[in-house]
Amino acid sequence: MASIGPNELFFLMQGLKWTLALTLVGFIGGGLFGLIVALTRTAQNDLVRRTTTGYIAVFQGTPLLMQLFVVYYGVALMGFNVDAWVAVAIAFTLHASAFLGEIWRGGIQAVPKGQTEAAKALGLHYVSMMKDVILPQAFKISLPATIGFLVQLIKGTSLAAIVGFVELSRAGQIVSNQTFRPLTVFALVGVIYFLICWPLSLWGARVERRLSTASR
Amino acid sequence: MSYSLDFSVVVARLPELLLACLATIGLSLAGMSLATVIGVLGVIARRSRFRLLRGLVIGFVELIRNTPFLVQIFFIFFALPQLGLRLNPTVTAIIALGLNGGAYAIEIIRGGVDAIPKGQVEAGLALGLHRAQIFRHIILKPALRTVYPSLTSQFVMLTLTTSVCTSIAAYELTSVAQKIEADTFRSFEVYFSITILYLIISSLMMGIFALISRFSFNYPVK
């Protein structure tokens, strides 16, 4: 039975690097597209709104793992010869855009209607009304849910392991197979995830408490 | 690109896939039941007089909610045998789904229980109900009604999570799809089709949950 030395730990850290990279790309890309999703989801135009509603429903109604598989093989089918990690990153971006879009949609709609009316009365056009009046308030309202989703996303990147991408979970699986010490390895991997996610969860809970006392 | 989509392999193995859908639904229902039991027991323990018990529940909830399901199921399937506990894939999947869903259920149900006005419990005491009766009729039932929407959407998520059980080769839709993919090399067609099957399953579940809520929560709210 091999032991877990510096080499194995280094390998896990390499995996962790990819977990964080995937999370970052998914969150930033998903944030940008999610903003578009949120804005179209709250648009006046019926067709635009329905299309986005459908987009969100599909991503929320299917497993993340399937989204990874479909995008992974779909990108290749469309003739793009891209790295596995780019394909996986695209999948996470799409996934995150639907969820963040829905979270921020809620935030936008929770901003009191008087704000929109006041902005319009002041003669602000759509872009400036959204940028300066509605979105700052909407983001504040949806901050706890956004942090909650970030935690979901970090945990979600573990599914890239099933597609064969070597991030933290897959690295753990490989080390476990090499050292025959699944108990230690998976406990260690779990602890690493926990140490990343738990502070975020606590932060989210604190922000939520602060917001609920502020609105009382 | 000269690749042309060919869904005939999927059509040919549709019976197999539909059977696997049933397995996925079965796995989900078992997971949901276990999660509900863990959720209710967890909330009772979370309100217990014993600090240690309360601490254990909080620790369990935080631990489960801040680690990936994949790592949890790997831990149960690959690590526990080292401690002498060997379970088959299906049992492992149900336990993992139940524990994972249970942790979320504890938090959700606790929110509903905390929302019960204290006066209700005092009224129950004044009427001479004993503790178990109060918990069942005054706390649990209204709390479950309050949390029903969040609890059921958590259950739909649990159903979608069953796809991860393919990683330990439990019998369900995704693992059957992976087998078909390996036989036919029609990766995109297979995964695209079962994504639609999952969409149907989750929509059906949401519909059934909505129906249940319409028929079972029909007593007056106020």
Image: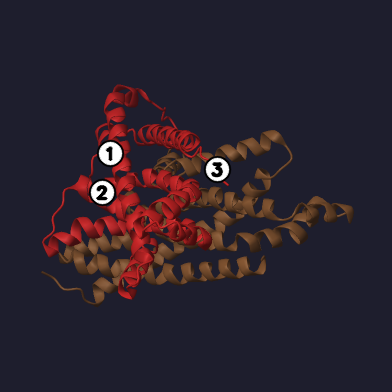
* Residue A130, percent from left and from top: 75, 55
User: Left or right: where does residue A145 sit relative to residue A178?
Assistant: right
The figure's colour scheme reads by chain
Query: Are both tags, 1 and 3, on one chain?
Result: no
The amino acid type found where label 3 is placed reads: Ile
Look at 30% across and 67% down and name the residue there: A189
Name the secondary structure under disc 1: loop
Q: Is residue B39 above or below residue B196?
A: below
Residue B79 placement: quadrant: bottom left
Residue under label 2: B93
* Cα–Cα gap, marks 3 and 2: 28 Å
Look at 63% across and 36% down and name the residue there: A50
User: Left or right: where does residue A148 sit relative to residue A107?
Assistant: left
Residue under label 3: A56
The amino acid type found where label 1 is placed reads: Glu
| Callout 1–callout 3 Cβ contact below 8 Å | no
Q: Is residue B197 above or below residue B8?
A: below
| Callout 2–callout 1 Cβ contact below 8 Å | yes
The amino acid type found where label 2 is placed reads: Ala
* Residue B72, percent from left and from top: 29, 59
Q: Colour of chain B?
A: red
* Residue A173, percent from left and from top: 25, 60
In the rendered image, the quadrant that contains the N terminus of chain A is: bottom left
Residue at the extreme bottom of the image, as rendered: A6
Q: Is residue B87 visible?
A: yes
Name the secondary structure under disc 2: helix
Q: Which dot marks residue B172? A: 1
Q: Is residue A3 above or below residue B7?
A: below
Q: Is residue B63 visible?
A: no
* Residue A125, percent from left and from top: 83, 52
Q: Colour of chain A?
A: brown
